[in-house]
Amino acid sequence: CLWPATGVESHVTKVKGAPLRLLRKASIMADATREIVERAVVHGQPASVNGRAFIDEDCLRELQGKQDFAEYQCAPGCEPPRMMPRRFPDLTVAEEHAPPTFSSKL
């Protein structure tokens, strides 16, 4: 799944008059999605992205090496405040990769 690091401009933010200084352009989500798909399909590395939770900015930083996000600012020169943690906590369950401990009689 893919989450935005900041508020993202949309029809609703326009109608409701959300301050542009708090938003990024929706193209950041499109660019992050493209990077994920390219990694999985074009580069043949689906295991590197499968099942992961990404944050748009961090995804572009990790997969594309991007460091400057100014092109996504809705108000030029105003970097919106981040609303997501730098990284999602690791929710891996130890038993996730363990063999099943039950048997079926079906």
Image (cartoon, helix red, strand yellow):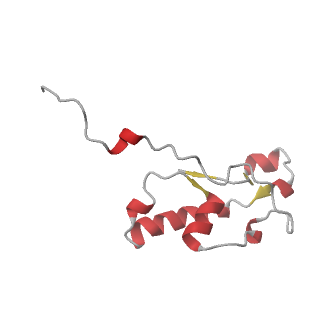
Name which quarter of the figure residue 61 lies in. bottom right
Residue visible at 33% across and 45% down?
Answer: 97
Q: Where 101 falls versus 78 (above or below)?
A: above
Q: Nearer the viewer, residue 95 or 76?
A: 95
Q: Nearer the viewer, residue 56 or 89?
A: 89
Q: Position of residue 23 (x, y in %)?
A: 78, 56
Q: Position of residue 60 (x, y in %)?
A: 61, 67
Q: Position of residue 21 (x, y in %)?
A: 86, 57
Name which quarter of the figure residue 75 lies in. bottom right
> Position of 97 compared to 4: left or right?
left
User: Which residue, as the protein is rendered here, is positioned at the far top?
Assistant: 105
Number of residue marks = 0
Q: Nearer the viewer, residue 101 or 70?
A: 101
Q: Position of residue 13 (x, y in %)?
A: 78, 48
Residue visible at 39% across and 62% down?
Answer: 46
Residue visible at 80% across and 54% down?
Answer: 81
> Position of 100 compared to 7: left or right?
left
User: Which residue, as the protein is rendered here, is positioned at the far front?
Assistant: 94
Residue visible at 75% across and 59% down?
Answer: 24
Instruction: Classify the position of the C terminus by image quarter.
Output: top left
Name which quarter of the figure residue 56 lies in. bottom right
Q: Nearer the viewer, residue 40 or 74?
A: 40
